[in-house]
Amino acid sequence: MSNSFWNEYRNKLVGADEAVKIVKSGDYISFGQIVTPTLEADKALAKRRDELKEVYIRSSSMSNYSEAVKSDPSKDHFIMNDISFSVIERKMQADQLVYHIPSLLHEVPEFYRRKPSDVVFLAAAPMDDRGFLNLSVTGLSLAAQLETAKHVVVEVHDTLPVVYGPDQWLHISQVDYVIEVEDSKLPLCLPHIEATEIEKRIAEYIVEEIEDGACLQLGVGGTPNDVGKIIADSDLKDLGVHTELLADAYVDMYEAGKITGRRKSIDKGTMVCNFAMGTGKLYEFINKNPLVSIASSDYTNNPYVIMQNDKVISICACINIDILGQVSSESVGRKQVSGTGGQFDYHYAAYHSKGGKGIICLQSARKDNETGKYISNIVPAFIPGTVVSMPSAVTSYVVTEYGIVNLKGKSTWERAEALVSIAHPECREKLIEECAKANIWRRTNKISRGLISANI
């Protein structure tokens, strides 16, 4: 094997302070995302604050509070724009240092094709003898970013797993600078969070809807992960995976013999995902594993691609749902909590998959610590300014700890009745009063179903 690739690599190897000199005022740049942040470049860029004006940063679910953004509370030098809010972005939002980019995840790669980044900063596993670096656990929209970017700067981490996929390889010839990171802590490992009793009850309702041969998409949160645990102990078989997020739950299901992918119509036998995020167990499982394939979000989240598999089961959480079936998953009023991500993509596609089901899950209510009363998460109407993540026409299955209902094809009064039936018992009467005011409640059905007294 020729040493030419290694010579090129060494020629491009610089320190972070040198690498970030490639950024100019007015540039659009992107940082490493999810569990593979580009920490060295971020710190080095912060040092250049006074040299730069209006550098626009685009990212998705940052796992670190950006040092560059933190250095510039005036937002004259660095303007952070994020597609999918995480805990970190919520902290940055409290400091008024981040803006949200509303988006459907399958469309995000096209954002970068139509408005390319001037500089892409990303993290990668070490180069092989053929000159290829691996993008590891992160797919997202990186392929499109690299396809159109003017410059590419790579932070190399020898702790990152190598993950296969059509979009996971970057040749050294496409790179401007390489920064080698010592004592790397990437990929970041998430702590294991045990599901609550309520989340477990919700998961039990969901698993009853899953059939042999189903193709799974489990979203973020305790309920989707607990679904995986229940499946691992169930009699289900020949399940497939086509998902946005690959988490520890899939490892549990695979090791229990539940995932084979044999009945998938496309990518048969392969776990297809957009990114992986979890504990060390997950990262060890996916390292050089031919069963796992990471692809760009315009493939993994493309509704047309998803629906080609039969029995797609999409499970996603939300914050609130109103009595018409509109779903809010990303904001409470103007306060951004998350992004749309792939919820719309997968819920829509699941309905159009033969035998598929899109499922939205939420806890029925939350308890007010001061009054001791329950506040319903099924609401008459959203707080003004709240983003509607899914319109009522798209919503199918909704599940709380009190049951599961299917809203698809139901009229407004049928939807209201169904949602009241899975609301917290202490909140139902108030919801019915609001439904009556909105003229979407039929008294005879209310009485016959026993949801409330005959006096209302």
Image (cartoon, grey):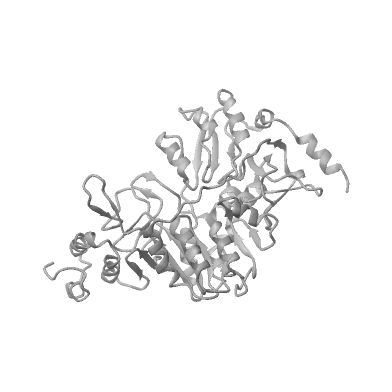
Q: Residue at x 54, y 36 (%)?
A: 56
Residue 20 picture location, percent across and down? 65, 31
Quarter location, residue 250: bottom right
Q: Residue at x 65, y 69 (%)?
A: 269
Name the one closer to the observer, 55 or 436: 436
Residue 216 picture location, percent across and down? 53, 66
Q: Is residue 320 visible?
A: yes
Report the side of 138 relative to 381 (left or right).
right
In this rendering, the answer to whether 407 lies above or below 150 is: below
**Which residue in the rendered view is the most extreme toward the top?**
50
Residue 341 picture location, percent across and down? 49, 54
How many badges with numbers are in the image? 0
Q: Residue at x 62, y 43 (%)?
A: 186
**Which residue in the rendered view is the most extreme toward the right?**
2
Residue 422 picture location, percent across and down? 30, 66
Name the one closer to the observer, 414 or 211: 211
Q: Is residue 246 visible?
A: no
In this rendering, the answer to whether 98 lies above or below 324 is: above
Q: Residue at x 69, y 57 (%)?
A: 164
Name the one closer to the observer, 232 or 98: 232
Quarter location, residue 47: top right
Quarter holding the C terminus is bottom left
In this rendering, the answer to whether 289 lies above or below 188 is: below
In this rendering, the answer to whether 131 lies above or below 451 is: above
